[in-house]
Amino acid sequence: MIGSMRKNVQKGNLKLIIWFVLLAMAGSSISLIYRMSQRSATGAADVATVNGLGISALEFRRRFIQVDSVISNIRRAYGPQADLILQLWHYDQKPEDIALNDLIQEKVVQSAADKLGIYVSPAYVESKLNDPLFVRQSLGSVVPAQVVENGTLNVTLLKTYLQRMGISETDFETLVQDTLARNLVQQLAQESLYIPQMAVKEQYAKEYLKKKFGLLSLNLDDYLKKIDTSKITEQELTAFYDAHKEQYRVPEKRTAQLWSFDPAQYDVVVTQKELQEYYDAHVSDYIDRQEEVTVKVLSFKEDKNKANEAAQRASKNAKEFDAQVASAQTLTLQRSDVKDRALTNAAFALAQTGDVSPVVYTKQGFVILKLVNRKPATYKPLSSVKEDIKKKATLDAFKRSFSVDGQRIINQAYDAPELFSKFIESKKAQKSTIENIAQDGTLKSQKIFGVAQEGGRVFYQEKDKGYIAELTKITPSFIPNLADIKQRVLEETKTEQARDLLEQDLKKIVAQKEGSLQERAKAAGISKVQFETTDFINSKSQDALKKLEDKHIPTSKLSILSRKGAMLYELADKAGFVYQVTETEPLDEKQYADTKARIEQQLRQQAQDGLGQSFVDTLKTKATVSVDQELLKRASGRTNN
C-alpha cells in the first residue's frame, strides 16, 4: 500500500495528501483498535486523548520533565538573553503547555499513520536503531543524550534507563515503531513538494547574480530638528506614556541570605566500587584514540544526475562500480571532524567494510562513499584516570546527597528551626547576602524568584557547589508616574514623531511611478537626501558590503532584490534607506547549470522544514482532542496553579 501510495503522492500536491489522510482517518483501523485495547488493559490514566489515542499521565510527566530541563538549561546557558532564545525556539510558554502540545501533535500524526495502515516491522526497527542519524534526530524525546554514544545506543545504559523510568523493552519498541510510523507519514507529505524552475532561477539571481545598487538615505537628525518639543501637548505626552507604560516598568527586586556548600567540606566518601561504576558509565569521556573510518569518496560536484546513475550502477553491477571507486579519493575521518559534517555523518553511517552510501550532498557536492576500513575507539585504563574520576565521582556523590539533604533540612526547619543552624554549622557553609537581585535568567535568580514569600527557603546546585537561599525582602515591580520620568518620555515622544515623518518620506519615494532614486525624491518634494551607488556586488562581496556597513548602511536586505528596478525601504535606528537595483549582470548559464541542483535541493529543504508543521497543524484542526485538566495539573506537579 505504501509503495503505490508513494508513487501517487509524487504526482499530486500537499492538499491532496492532507485530504487523503483526513478521509482515511474517518474510517476504522485495526491497529488503532489494538493500541486502544492495549491502553485499556494497562489501566493507565490519560491526561488527554487525541482521536481515541491516549496520552498517559506517565507519558506526559516524562515529556514535561524533558521540556522543563531544556528550558532550565537554556536559562543557565544564556542568562539575560534566554527569553529571546526561548522565543526563537518557540519555548516561551509554560513547560506543561509545550509538553502537552508536542504530545498532541505526535498523536495526531500517529492517528494518521494508524488510519493509513502503516506497518513498521521489527527488522526495520532494528535497522533504524543502528542508524546514527535516526537515533540523534528522532529519539531525543524517548531517551536521554547520555544513552547515545558516538551516534549509537549503548544497550547497557539504555536498559538501565528504561528500568529506572519504568519502561519495558516491549514498550520501548512500541515507542520506536510509533516514531518511525510518524516519520513515514510526514515523509509522504514532503515527497509531494514541487519546486518551480522559476523559483530556482529567482533564488540563483539572489545568491549569485551581481547587481549595482542605488542607495538613498535620509538622516533621522534632520527630522528630529523638525519636532519642537515645546509644541508636544500634554495629551500627546500622556498618550505616548500610556501606550508604552511597560517599557518604563522597574522590575521586582529581591534580597536574600545565601549559604554555599562545598563538596570538600561535605564529608562525601567514594568507594572503589563507585569509582569503577563511574568509569564504566563515562568511559566514552576517556577516549585514548577516536573511532576512525576510511572511505573512498566518489565525487560528482554539482551533477546530481551522474551521481544517481552511479548509485544505480552500484546496485546492479558491483564489479563495474568497484573499478570506478578504486581511483577515487581516500579519506580517513574521525567523528569529531566538523569541516564537512554531512560527509562525516554519511561515512560513519556505513556499518560494514564494503558498504556503499546513497548519494549524499556535501561541501564537495554530490558524493557516494564506500567504507574501506573502520577502527574502533580505544579508551584509557581506569588506573591512568583514577584521580580525575575520583574528583568527578565525589562531586556526583555530593550532588546526589545535597539534592536530598537540601529539601529535607528546609522541610524540617519549618518545625524545628534549630536543625537548620546545626546543619549549616556541621557542613561549614559560607554565608553571604544578595542585595536587590533582579530576575535576570540566571539559576540563582530563578530559584529566589520562585520563593512565594519572605522567609521562604529554596535549595539549588550550580557548577560545583550547593546553595540554600532564604528570601528576606521583596521590592515589588512598579511603573513610575509620568511626572517622575517626564523628560525621558518627552524625548522618546519626539523621536517617535520624527521616525514617523521619516518613514512617510521613505514611502513617498518608493510610491513614485518611475525614475531613479534621486528623481523620485525630487518628485516627492524631498531635497535633503544622501545618495551613492555601488559597483557590481552580491552576497559574497564581503569587502564591498563591509564598506557599506562601516558607513552604517544596512546590507542584509540587498539580496532580497533580484531584478533591475526592484526597490525597498528600511528604517534603521539613525536613518532611513531606500535601495534600488540599477543594473544586473547577465545570467551565467554554465554557473546556473552547475548550481541548479544544489539550489533546488536547498529550496526543497526550506519548503520541507515549513511543511512539517503546517501539515501537522492541518491534521490538528480536524482532530478530536479532550484534556483532563485536573489530572494534567497533578501530572505536572502544579496543583497550586
Image: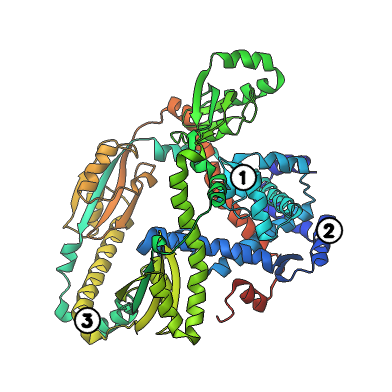
Measure how far apart labels 3 and 2 are at the Cα level: 67 Å
- SS label for mark 2: helix
- SS label for mark 1: helix
Q: Amino acid at mark 3?
A: Ile
Numbered disc in front, either 1 or 3: 1
Quadrant location, the C terminus: bottom right
Left or right: 625 with respect to 459?
A: right
Q: Tag on residue 485?
A: 3
**Taking 480 as reference, is 552 above or below it?**
above
Measure how far apart labels 2 and 1 are at the Cα level: 27 Å
Q: Tag on residue 135?
A: 1
Left or right: 514 with respect to 427?
A: left
Q: Residue 376 in the image: x percent, y percent?
A: 57, 30
Q: Tag on residue 34?
A: 2
The part of the image, by quadrant, that contains residue 528 is bottom left
Q: Residue 327 in the image: x percent, y percent?
A: 54, 13
